[in-house]
Amino acid sequence: MGESIGSDEELRRVVMTLVLGIPVYICIELYFERRNKSNEKFKYLIYIIAAICLAVYGYFCLGDLNMVQVTRYVGLIIIFITGFFFTPYIYKDGSFEMYVIKVLGRFFTTVLYSIVLYLGLIAILFTVDYLLGIEVKYEIYYYTWLIVVGVFAQCFFLGGIPEKEEVIKVEKYPKVFKILMLYIIMPLISIYTIILYIYFAKIIITRQWPQGLVSHLVLWYGVISAGTLFLTSPVKENSPWVSKFVKMFPKAILPLIVLMFISMGIRVNAYGITENRYFVLALGIWVFGIMVYYSIIKKVKNIILPISLTIITFISICGPLSSYSLSKYSQNKRFEKFLIKNNMIENGKIVKAIDPVSKDDQIELNSILDYFNRKHELKDIKYLPGNFTISDTEMVLGITYSNLNYESRYEHFYFTSEEILELIEIKDYDYLFNIISYQSAANKNSYGITVDYNKSYNELKILEKGKQIYNKNLNEYFNRIIDKYGVNKTNSIPVEDMQFEDETDKVKIKIKIDNFSGRKDLNYDHIESTEIQFSVFVKIK
């Protein structure tokens, strides 16, 4: 059993090293092939050095596949793949964009042919097994896939790379690609931009900054947009639509990227830098820089895109400014701030907490320890003993450690009113609406008055003849109940604690909650996934 595990480990290292070696050797070959003067001895020397570097990297850096090793490996793959695109044009001017488009076209063709070939081969194997009774083991299907991907796909793909002296004219721009970019992707990006600006306006009006998902939506939208600008640049001279898009769009996207940076800045300020946030910020900086470049430079050189992406990727995975170094530094500063706040440092050394530590601070400490325990090593945390383990948390810090995984980070709750079946008095109000969030539409309309409940944001809106006259986030009321009665248990609440009144210059509101349930995220201290049944009393002034 031990020998099997060891051999599997060695095989994995060899395979990962060989996979990394493919783009490395392609880059070297393309570099020397495109040089006007090529020294064969020097080229083979570079090959030998590359082989030694790959062997050393595979042996020492591809052991236990933790987060650092995996992300660094992926980063190196990205570096050499982007290098594969721009290396042939280091010593050559010309249609770089058309070269990339032809290579991408060859790649998609290779994927299609490989899938068809593999499906055909496994159909033959299945037929032999099923009809002729010749047993075909599962491993044969796996090895067939490896042969298709490792031999056929690579040979077919590399056979389609443009030759050194080949000139790719704009007239050879693929028609299918042109239709896809000009009449499908570009209109979709334009519509998406309008939606993001509407959302941007909503943020300014409500003054509620977004968290989490919106940053990723803007980021990937920006990356796709940068790729679109790159791939459509060869035809912009022949298409007014593309010409206007390339001229106007980079300026239009800049405020949205700034919005993303503000959103990310809020999270970084609250929870520090982690590798994931670093990668988002780094890619966002790259997109922002590219869009500024497109905005101010009239005659752009698109080779800047892959070269700058390669540099950003290299900085992200290597050196003192890497994601790993800055993340550990940031989380250590969080830890130090926690210790100072709770008077747990004396003469530069850590001491147990004397005063009770708040629940929020305990959650913050647990998240810091969990981060280092999962992604790095606990010895990377300053002030802690070198032999510190998670089990020592209470002994060293005087605080109990709780693993904040997906399940334990949430507190679930369910509250119901003690008098659901009581007689409802509607005196002093004009309208009564009953809302159930899990119905297909938590929206009620009567006599020109519309009451709308958005489950995703726990937001209640009231409109009169289509015009909004009231807006309230019910999390305020949920938190009052949770703070008073706690969570992780079923609570039957007195009716007076389940109803709330509010008033504006246009409307008087009374909200009577029958029951609500959901969960509270301990990491970010907000309520989500709430189901609710309640009544809304409305009086129009």
Image (cartoon, rainbow, N blue to C red):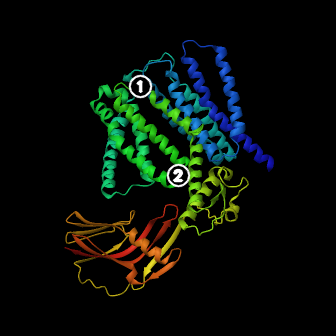
For disc 1, the marked residue is: 301
263 is higher (above) or lower (below) than 150: below
Q: CA distance from mark 1 to mark 2?
A: 36 Å
Task: Identify the element where label 2 is drawn.
Answer: loop
Q: Type of residue at label 2?
A: Gly
- Give the x, y percent position of residue 76: 59, 35
Quarter location, residue 8: top right
Query: Cβ–Cβ below 8 Å for labels 1 and 2?
Result: no
Quarter location, residue 61: top right
Q: Residue furthest top?
A: 37
Q: Residue furthest front?
A: 347
For disc 2, the marked residue is: 272
Q: Residue furthest bottom?
A: 423
Task: Identify the element where label 1 is drawn.
Answer: loop
Q: Residue at x 44, y 75 (%)?
A: 481
Q: Type of residue at label 1?
A: Lys
Q: How many marks?
A: 2
450 is higher (above) or lower (below) than 494: above
Quarter location, residue 464: bottom left
- Give the x, y percent position of residue 399: 63, 66
- The crowd level at tag 2 (other Cα within 10 Å; few <14, some 14-19, many 20+) is many
